[in-house]
Image (spheres, rainbow, N blue to C red):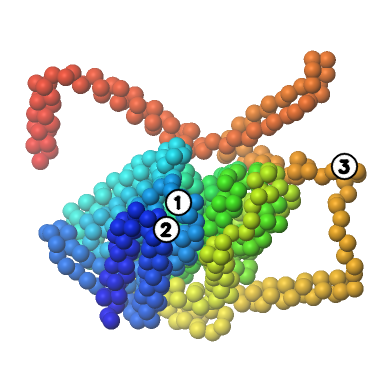
Amino acid sequence: MTIEINFFILIALYVCGAVGALLFRKNDQIANWWSGIMAIIGSLWGIVFAINSFLHYSKNIFTYDYSVFPLLNLSFHIDQLSAFFIFIISLIALFCSIYGIDYVKHFYKKYDLGVLGFFYHLFIAGMLLVVSATNGLLFLIAWEIMAVSSYFLVVYDRENKNNVDAGFLYLIMTHVGTAFIVLAFLIMYVFAGSFDFTAIKAGLVSMPDFFKNTIFVLALIGFGTKAGIIPVHIWLPSAHPAAPSHISALMSGVMIKTGIYMMIRIFFDMFSSIPLWWGIVVLIVGATSALLGVLYALTEHDLKRLLAYHSIENIGIILLGLGSSLIFYSLGNLTLAIFSLAAALFHILNHAVFKALLFLSAGSVISQTHTRNIEKYGGLIKYMPLTAFFFLIGSVAISGLPPFNGFFSEWMTFQSLLQGIASTDIFIKLIFVLAAGSLALTGGLALVCFVKVFGATFLARPRSEIVKQAKESSILFSLSMGALATICLIFGIASGYFGILLTKISASLNIFQNATLFFNESINGSLITPNGSATVSAPLWFIVFALILILVIFWVKFLINKNQIIKIGATWDCGINLNERMEITATGFSRSIVTIFSHILRPSIQHEVEYNDSEMRFLHKSKIVRLEIHDVYQTYFYQPIHKLISILSSKAKSIQSGNINIYILYILITLIFILFLL
């Protein structure tokens, strides 16, 4: 079969999965298995399709164009970049679908699983169409399919009012972003005379700079809203926790990357010239999102909200690579521009894998404890050892520690920023210094955050009775988490190969068509530039060193314990029985960080003290300290806008007199005004 037929079969599999789930909706069990199996088949087909597309090594793999209406074509185009994103979507969807077969069982008899399967398949199909559509109107239809289906997945557990509120906020923000995207496409249409991406590329060449800059701002806000960049991130920490955990993994690991995909498509594939300030803006937005994302994650004690904030952090890291690439291109250094874009693509892939692993592990914990509050966990490693092990691997990967995959994409991003510091321009040098400092601080804070999360969740003693009732999750849970944990290790060890592959994908974009690169296919996976210098993308020596260190630790432990007799007894604490109140809590662990960054986080602290009696008022019977963090963007940006809109709406109500003659007058005045403008 040709690649074109394989692509349409891929979409058809998800359409059949969606329709079948609705047909079987009267029987939850059949609907669940149909949805899960069809999604698994579709995901496997997508992985094979993407790999087969990579093997063509051509810039354009296939193009399909069929006219439906004058402005709407069924226009699809698969190139190396599209195939890369199809691979990510299919890979994460595969393990989320396996996981979901067991996870949704607790919804039996409560909600309609056929409806869940319908929107689940529609959601994945929408993402696939987004990264393959090459007609503006078709893209917007696919974008809406993805947005609306994900909304219904967010509010699926609708008995919880917080989930409904989170879904409403998500729906508002996603359509605010869509409004900016529509405006960008309308400006493109004015100059290109078509919504076809090929015609838009030609039209953008002669477009005045003012309109190019306008499109950049509109695209950054519109697609940045979907990606969750600060300050248009407010929907993300609410929506991701509200959805079922395997849906959260898809949204956080894959869906938000569709916004990054379109930024790359527009900035690097449609434009032929890039002003320097574009890259500087993206770099600053990336540094801000990375640093504030991890700071807010540190203050969270809701496990899924914490992971959602880390998505904002990692989107910021991706934008650091993307911004570096834009700056290097505007400065004429195509080699470093391609390398920086490859770093961003590598982190897109790595984040999808380890974030899906973390969300699935969190779902495993929540399914057993029925709470997302980290303060009520503790000691789960004794009851859920496999989940603890897989969560630990995800924690190490997201913290950027070798030999797992997160380290190597962050290493490449660091290399890009350090190359920017070597710039001769003092202003550019300062921007890159601040960005590199932000990335370094972000990495350190991410490590602190996951020490807190893993310690408070899995170590020490149980802090509630629900933990003592927990048991290890099902085989499908363990299979999904174990496979993703293994991929984290494989992608880390084989990072040199992926670095070369992603550099080739970056170089295939239209804006780099005149770039000349020479690749060294040796074991260290280095990128050799035309002037002969080498930039190491995957330090193999670090992997070897880490493996040797692990072997030495195990050998020393074996020698120490070889002839020892081990006795297990209760921990001595001066004759006092240890209990869960003697452990450090997640709040206590992060308190010092909150204090250091109090000017940014603006914490509020409430003390509730109960005294013994009036005569002993200085002796506390109990003391409760509550630490609350309010999002400064909500407090100082969104709430004032909300108040302003409410005031204007109240004023506008005065024109509703109820007199039809007055309404006709309003229409007449509006028509005259429009005719005057024309």
Question: How many numbered marks have been drawn onto this rendered protein structure?
Answer: 3
**Does 565 sit left or right of 110 as displayed?**
right
How far apart, in angstroms, are the residues tagged by discs 3 and 1?
Answer: 46 Å
Q: Closer to the observer: label 3 or label 1?
A: 1
Mark pair 2, 3: CA separation: 52 Å
Q: Quadrant of the C terminus?
A: top left
Q: Are marks 1 and 2 in contact (CB under 8 Å)?
A: yes
Could you tell me which residue is drawn at 12 percent across and 36 percent down? 674
* 78 vs 585, nearest the viewer: 585
- Residue 29 — which label? 2
For residue 108, the mark is: 1
What residue is shown with label 3?
576
Looking at the image, which residue is at 30% across and 64% down? Answer: 16
Q: Against 515, is 618 above or below?
A: above
Indicate the secondary structure of the residue bearing disc 3.
Answer: loop
Q: Amino acid at mark 3?
A: Ile
- Badge 3 crowding class, 10 Å Cα cut-off, few under 14, some 14 to 19, many 20 or more, is few
Question: Which is nearer the eye, 405 or 203?
Answer: 405
Q: Nearer the viewer, residue 317 or 565?
A: 565
Quarter of the picture containing the N terminus is bottom left
> Residue at the top extreme?
614
